[in-house]
Image: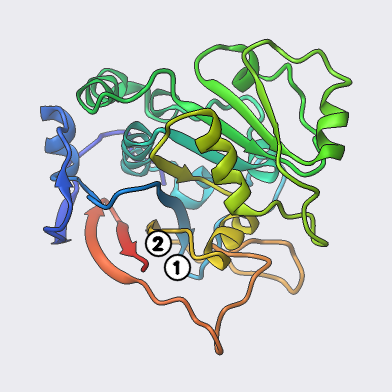
């Protein structure tokens, strides 16, 4: 199920809150209006694609990424690129990082055909260049020779624990890579998301922070009440699950309902092909 022709999304619901971003004409024609929250302080938002039955990763060798979930939809890639273009930093956990070790989290990497439009948008928004990629790893089990660290397409930061930093120091780190030590992590190996944000803010004046995974990292941010918006693409696929097969849902490692469910407000709905593009606001 691959769509190669990029057609405009149809807008079914659009919030009028927030400031209208200066999308270049082609991007505006493809996506429509895009508004960002006008609140002060860091704006943390997340983007995922999931199946109708809530699976965000098939957890199979060579098929663990979002492409297998979306049917390699060009519309989904366009939206992913747009969200990256509006961000100051993209934050990923080590699991997501290892799923696609050759990837660099830039707008043009996910949707090359719109590279010029993404760059025009970032220039109009006065975004710092290059985009910051942040990899969160408690263990420090990261290969510093991979493109995100050596290509110079992005500014690269690793947020880790003292043990992780010690492991990373055994490698010859490329000069542009920042290694920020923020704590020892908790019993489950998670690093405090507030400490992650503090590390990013301490090194760079970055305001719009995009979480692209994985589900455990996202769960920890939801647990601390730090996610302001959730972008969710729903693909018309039933993936199914076996008991304990390792397939992941949007949030893993944290439970909220029935005692403390997290309720969002639906603020935007668009359709591209057979995919639904949903946007939720969280208090």
Position of residue 262 in the picture relative to residue 271 (left or right)? right
Dot 1: element = loop
The quarter of the image holding the C terminus is bottom left
Q: Residue at x 82, y 41 (%)?
A: 139
Task: Using the image as rendered, state which of residue 120 and residue 32 is in the foreground.
Answer: 120
* Farthest residue, direction front: 202
Asked whether residue 214 is in view, the answer is no
Residue under label 1, please give it. 52
Position of residue 52 in the picture relative to residue 20 (left or right)? right
Looking at marks 1 and 2 on the same chain, the residue that comes earlier in the sequence is marked by: 1
Q: Position of residue 279 (x, y in %)?
A: 31, 59
Q: Quadrant of residue 30?
A: top left
Asked whether residue 84 is in view, the answer is yes
Q: How is the image coloured?
A: rainbow
Q: Residue at x 11, y 58 (%)?
A: 16
Q: Residue at x 15, y 53 (%)?
A: 10
Position of residue 205 in the picture relative to residue 35 (left or right)? right
How many neighbours does mark 1 have within 10 angstroms: few (below 14), some (14-19), or many (20 or more)? some
Q: Which mark is residue 236?
A: 2
Q: Are marks 1 and 2 in contact (CB under 8 Å)?
A: yes
Q: Quadrant of residue 76?
A: top left
């Amino acid at each position: 199920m691959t769509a190669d022709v990029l057609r405009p999304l149809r807008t079914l619901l659009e919030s009028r809150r927030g400031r209208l971003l200066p999308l270049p004409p082609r991007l505006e024609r493809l996506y429509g209006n895009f508004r960002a929250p006008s609140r002060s302080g860091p704006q943390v938002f997340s983007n995922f694609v999931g199946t109708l039955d809530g699976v965000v990763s098939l957890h199979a060798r060579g098929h663990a990424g979002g492409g297998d979930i979306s049917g390699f939809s060009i519309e989904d890639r366009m939206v992913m690129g747009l969200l990256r273009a509006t961000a100051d930093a993209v934050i990923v956990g080590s699991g997501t990082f290892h799923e696609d070790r050759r990837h660099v989290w830039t707008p043009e990497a996910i949707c090359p055909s719109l590279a010029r439009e993404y760059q025009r948008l970032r220039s109009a928004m006065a975004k710092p260049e290059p985009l910051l990629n942040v990899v969160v790893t408690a263990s420090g089990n990261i290969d510093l020779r991979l493109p995100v660290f050596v290509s110079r397409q992005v500014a690269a930061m690793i947020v880790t624990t003292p043990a992780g930093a010690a492991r990373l120091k055994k490698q010859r780190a490329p000069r542009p890579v920042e290694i920020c030590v923020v704590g020892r992590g908790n019993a489950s190996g998670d690093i405090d998301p507030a400490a992650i944000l503090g590390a990013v803010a301490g090194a760079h004046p970055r305001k719009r922070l995009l979480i692209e995974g994985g589900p455990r990292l996202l769960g920890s941010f939801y647990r601390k009440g730090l996610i302001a918006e959730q972008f969710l693409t729903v693909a018309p696929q039933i993936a199914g699950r076996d008991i304990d097969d390792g397939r992941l849902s949007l949030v893993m490692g944290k439970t909220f309902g029935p005692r403390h469910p997290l309720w969002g407000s639906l603020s935007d709905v668009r359709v591209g092909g057979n995919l639904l593009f949903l946007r939720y606001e969280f208090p």
